[in-house]
Amino acid sequence: MVDLSKNRHTQIDMLALAGEESIKPSSKNAERQASHSSDRILQKDNQNNNKSRLTGKHTLKPQRSSDMNKSRSTQENSGMVGALRLRAAWKSPWDKYEKIYDLELGGAVVVAVRKTAPVELVHVRLFSRSAGEKALHMFRQIQHRNIVTALDAFTTSEGLFMILEHMPISLDQLVSSPAYPDEQQLSAILGQVLNGIDYLSAEGFEHGSLCCSNIFVKTNGEVKIANQECCHSAKPRGNTRDLRALSPIVMELMQKYVKEDEAIGIDDLHRWHPNSNAVGFLSATTSATSIKELLKHPLMAGQWRKESLIGLISLAQVCLRGRYKYTSILV
């Protein structure tokens, strides 16, 4: 029997966070400044788009309007969504959303609920002023069904608040639960991760910081890459860092830890047969030269279904303890 306490390297260290106090704008000049800042980003996007048409090189650019007007059915089949035209309104997000609790999930987030219809849970992330411009730019550009969706943006004297779709857990919580995925469930997780990375690569981006803690999971089985503010233009060789990040992710999903000497392999060969597609896929992550190569691997060839994950996700949620901070609001 494997002693997970000794071998488990990636630990969830979720800290209790202090509650934020929203600050409203103090002048119309501040509002105009925020609006101008948002406009500058849009202008940069348009300038980059024009440059890319002249040079043929990839730059950080919004999708063309023709792409944005594709039918919903086409977008759903491809997984691509038009670039967002978010403007960061100068106002407190707490005018529109009610804070519920603080959470550590791929970074500090606030779980909140929209006050008006459609009433739904969201995640609220705060970025400093220095990091806010790039974050807003990246959340506009990077849109795919396997990447966390940005819904809204607000600016206050504290910085930029991004409103993101609610994703209750990460792959880290799946790894920490007692259940192991079977081969079909493993392919359902990795298939969605590969689709997200493949999209980034096609758009000329590299995430660069992929790990179990910033790949999120919905209760319906959807798996999405988070923290797209980490993304940057990929080097000519492609997104090799994202490709190599897959090996420890796959190992953790299969046996709940990575090897101390950073070797790639599986110790529990009773659970995972040496000739299985899962073990073969793990081996392929060390030599593959592209994400498309891995998408053609036999593990991905079957008809995997995201719905096969709902049992694992439910158990992971039940096992989750002490990962939040709730502050009572006295009226």
Image (spheres, grey):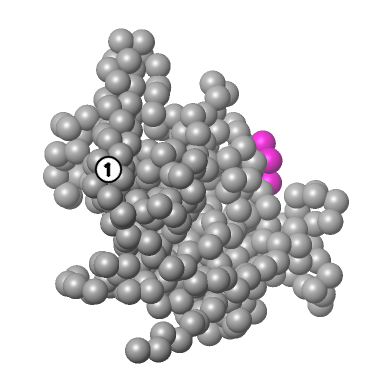
Query: Residue 31, percent across and down?
Result: 26, 46
Q: Nearer the viewer, residue 73 or 30?
A: 30
Placement of 95 over or under 297, stated as above or below: below
Element carrying mark 1: helix
Query: Image quadrant of residue 175?
Result: bottom right
Up-down: is 195 above or below 233?
A: below
Q: Which residues are magenta?
A: 283-287
Q: Residue at x 40, y 89 (%)?
A: 330
**Identity of the residue furthest to the top in this view:** 54
Q: Nearer the viewer, residue 10 or 260?
A: 10
Residue under numbered circle 1: 29
Residue 302: horizontal and vertical position, in percent? 44, 55
**Position above or below: 242 against 115:** above
What residue sits 14% from the left and 39% below the top? Answer: 69
Quarter of the figure with residue 267: bottom right
Visible in this render: residue 260? yes
* Quadrant of the drawing holding the N terminus: bottom right
Work out whether 114 lies above or below 225. Answer: below
Q: Residue at x 41, y 85 (%)?
A: 329
User: Which residue occupies 68% across, 57% down?
Assistant: 251
